[in-house]
Image (cartoon, helix red, strand yellow):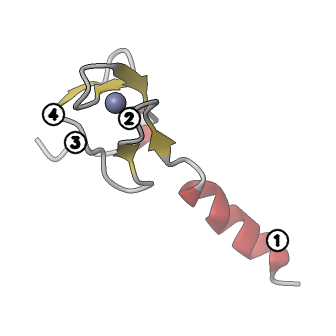
Amino acid sequence: MRSAASTSERRELDQRVVCECGHVVYDGEVIRARCVHPESGTAKCRCKRWVAVPVGLIRSAG
Ligand SMILES: [Zn+2]
């Protein structure tokens, strides 16, 4: 009966965001982008494409 618990944990990992260029913009814990717009919930990938990330759930590292 642990499947339910592991499923909820998996959900956080599934929030991983990969850009169309293949770069992992958000690995489920850290946003790997040079620019982040918390207001619009997007991060700028290294390919200069703006990708939607769950930035509202993340504490900015500065
Ligand atoms: Zn990209």
The residue where tag 4 is placed is 34
Q: Say few, some or many: other residues with alpha carbon within 10 Å of mark 2 (under 14 / 14 to 19 / 20 or more).
A: some
The residue where tag 1 is placed is 4
* First reached walking from the N terminus: tag 2 or tag 3: 2
Q: CA distance from mark 3 to mark 1?
A: 30 Å
Asked whether the residues under the numbered discs 2 and 3 touch, taking CB atoms below 8 Å apart as contact, a structural biologist would say yes
The quarter of the picture where residue 51 lies is top left
Q: Residue at x 71, y 74 (%)?
A: 6
Tell me: is circle 2 under 8 Å from ligand 1: no
* First reached walking from the N terminus: tag 4 or tag 2: 4
Q: Amino acid at mark 3?
A: Ser
In front of the other: 46 or 61: 46
Q: CA distance from mark 4 to mark 2?
A: 13 Å
Where 9 falls versus 20 (above or below)? below
The residue where tag 2 is placed is 55
* First reached walking from the N terminus: tag 1 or tag 2: 1
